[in-house]
Amino acid sequence: MGKDGSYGIYTPDLKNTIIGNGDSVAEAKADFEEGVREMKASYLERGLPLPKELVDLEFVFKYDIPSFFNYYPMLNASGFARFIGMNPTLILQYKLGRAYISEKQMKRIENGIHRLGSMLTDVKFT
């Protein structure tokens, strides 16, 4: 999430950079998908073949840690930290974007989110 509260999406692994922006994740994804359509149309309008990287293009949308906790405010960062056995102050620093997060710590948080998701899908009410 940007400092202005907007969301941004980009393609770090493509030679053709495509970006999307919006006031919500859904708006950013829609803008991004429009950018993909426009890029493909540009090649076709000029009679150029599509680069291989743009043929059958599929995306995996990923969050950074601050954006994740801002997009899902119902997840209390401190409570989640205790759930995964992490220092609550540290995860708060990650949430605020004030501390570097290693790949190992990012994976630990991601695994915790997946574990929580599995637990939630098992919930049954009577």
Image (tube, helix red, strand yellow):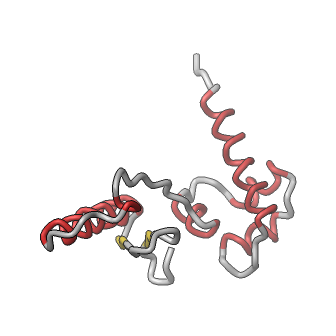
Q: Position of residue 95 (x, y in %)?
A: 67, 70
Question: Looking at the image, which residue is at 38% across and 54% down?
Answer: 57
Q: Nearer the viewer, residue 78 or 57?
A: 57
Q: Nearer the viewer, residue 62 or 96?
A: 62
Q: Is residue 72 above or below residue 117?
A: below
Is 66 placed left or right of 17 in the picture?
right
Percent across and percent down for residue 98 are: 71, 81
> In this view, which residue lies farthest toward the top?
126
Where residue 114 appears, as percent x and y from the top left, is 67, 43
**Would you place residue 102 above or below residue 52 in this image?**
below
Q: Up-down: is 50 above or below 55?
A: below
x 63%, y 26%: residue:
123
Q: Residue at x 38, y 60 (%)?
A: 52
- The image shows a total of numbered marks equal to 0
Residue 33 versus residue 110 in the image, above or below: below
The answer to whether residue 16 is left or right of residue 80 is left
Q: Front-most of 51 and 112?
A: 51
Q: Quadrant of the C terminus?
A: top right
Name the residue: 56% across, 67% down.
Answer: 67
